[in-house]
Image (spheres, rainbow, N blue to C red):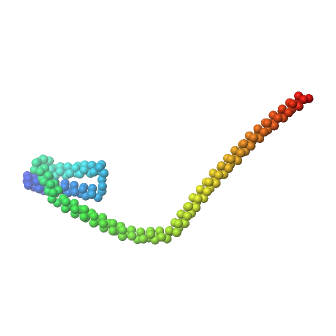
Amino acid sequence: MDYLPHSQEYMLAVSVMGGMLLGFIWDIYRLFRHYIKLSNAGTAIGDIVYWILSIYIGVQLIFDLSYGNIRFFILMGFIIGALLYFYGISRYILKAFIFIVDTVLKIIKKIINFLIGPLKFIYKQLKKFLYPVKLKCEKAKIKAKKRYKFFKFRLKKVSKNRKMIYNKKKQLRRLNKRRKGQKRERRSKNYRTEEKNK
């Protein structure tokens, strides 16, 4: 790049172009946000990245134009370039970009649908073919659930019957013990009365 540090017209023209370039980068960021919805944190990060990039480009241009000497007309050139871009061609460029991206996305969708179309057709045919198998599997599943519930119910009943039988046996044992004890007491009483009578 040829440097003309003493030509103010050149520096002004380049700074105006630099302001337009920063506006163009901002439009690209807006386009990105148009298709990808960012959260508040994502928007804040994007803004910070844009400002870091714009400061870097601005500083580089100042160093290239005037060897780091900040001059008023250079800053005015950046502002004029940004204003010219935003109030002049920004809306047309953004609309053109949106139109291009939308058409590209539509073409990609059509290509994907064209490629997936045969697979969808095969899937539908397989679904129709396997529908009776699906019904059989569902019936078998329902039968298995019913059998499991019936088996569970039978197990509960059996466990209840066992408990009842066990409790009955316990009660019978207790009654037998009581009866045996009563018989012994009667025998002992009868034995005592007989001894007294003798």
Residue 12, image quadrant: bottom left
Please state which of residues 27 and 78 is positioned toward the viewer in this rendering. Answer: 27
Instruction: Tell me residue 150's x, y (percent).
Output: 61, 57
- Residue drawn at the location 11% of the way across and 48% of the way down: 71
Residue 108, image quadrant: bottom left
Residue furthest right as drawn: 198
Image side of residue 140 versus residue 19, left or right: right
- Residue drawn at the location 67% of the way across and 47% of the way down: 163
- Residue drawn at the location 74% of the way across and 43% of the way down: 172
Please state which of residues 1 and 147 is positioned toward the viewer in this rendering. Answer: 147
Instruction: Tell me residue 13's x, y (percent).
Output: 11, 56
The reply to whether residue 64 is visible in this rendering is no
Q: How many marks?
A: 0
Image side of residue 124 versus residue 90, left or right: right
Image vertical order of residue 67 relative to residue 182, above or below: below
Residue 116, image quadrant: bottom left
The reply to whether residue 62 is visible in this rendering is yes
Instruction: Tell me residue 60's x, y (percent).
Output: 18, 51
For the N terminus, the image quarter is bottom left
- Residue drawn at the location 58% of the way across and 61% of the way down: 143
